[in-house]
Amino acid sequence: MDNVFPQESADCANLPKTIALIGKYHSQEIADSIRQLARYLHERGMTVLIEEETARNLVSQLDLRSWASGSFSWLGAHADMAIVVGGDGTMLNAARQLARYRVPLVGVNQGRLGFMTDIARNDMLTCMDDLLDGKFLPETRMLLDAEIVSDERSVAANLALNDVVVDKGAIGRMIELELFVDGEFIYHLRADGLIVATSTGSTAYALSANGPILHPRISAIALVPLCPHALSNRPIVVSDRSEIEIRIVYATDSRAHFDGQLAVDLKNGDCIRIRRSEYSICLLHPPGYSYFAMLRQKLHWSERPKEH
């Protein structure tokens, strides 16, 4: 069967003419970075756009009168590429907002770990030369499409690049749920919750819950229990073509979380239906980028123990 989810989008390879800048935090560092990027890109003949919330947050620190600003949908209609300045949280939000417009994303890391924002601030302008010359490497990442059904009625739907998490909420009692894959009952779970993660999200919340690390080229979805009552409830990896259904059997304060940024309250009997989204995003990496080198750096693999 042909793969209905193309691995690389043709849009990834196009040289940009209009570039959007996105950075959400109230930060002098980010304001400085966006100002430097805007001036540099303008000098290189690019049309520069600023995401409107970024403009509002940084208006006291950055003169934005020279640059047009607008909503994510406006950026999606006009930008050939978006540069996200901040951490992975800023990138996650931008990815969900721009996925339907097929705008490639480049990340400048001014957060902490930065699994998706792989350009260091000190190398930012140097890397722009390679970016504008078309030397960056495209990589397509899948998203999840999640729908919440309550009383046989769809009440919410969201995208997630990292994960969809169903958890017990603030109250200490465990959540009870049933898991189905492609209509087949898998198990009854009593736990703090369940993480449904993409390959991208396998290094996020799922990693801290002892889930597997999935290489981005693997088309798969990880199902990772959170502190299960039965230790035999282990992480499971299923095909990205699978349809996953989580049914809430009993909970007192449960919620569904999307990339840890959006949340919807759940009640007993609700169903969360998850499948691969028709949308994907394209991340652009600098020349020489290596996924395993990134893991070694971020996770401190191969470091020698400190001598006392």
Image: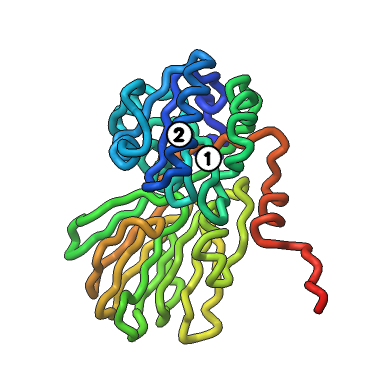
Labels 1 and 2: the sequence-earlier one: 2
Between 171 and 25, the one lying in front of the other is: 25
Query: Which quadrant of the structure image shows residue 151?
Result: bottom left
Q: Does 181 appear above or below 100?
A: below
**Amino acid type, mark 1:** Gly
Q: Which residue is mark 1?
A: 107
Asked if residue 155 shows in the view, the reply is yes
Q: Which residue is mark 2?
A: 34
Residue at 23% over, 75% down: 268
Q: Is residue 162 above or below residue 191?
A: above
Res 4 seen here: no
Number of labels in the image equals: 2
Identify which residue, 69 or 245, lies in the foreground. 69
Q: Amino acid at mark 2?
A: Ile
- Give me the C-alpha separation between circle 1 and circle 2: 12 Å
Above or below residue 129? Residue 152 is below
Classify the position of the N terminus by image quarter: top right
Q: Residue at 30% x, 39% y: name it.
A: 53
Mark nearest the camera among 1 and 2 is 2
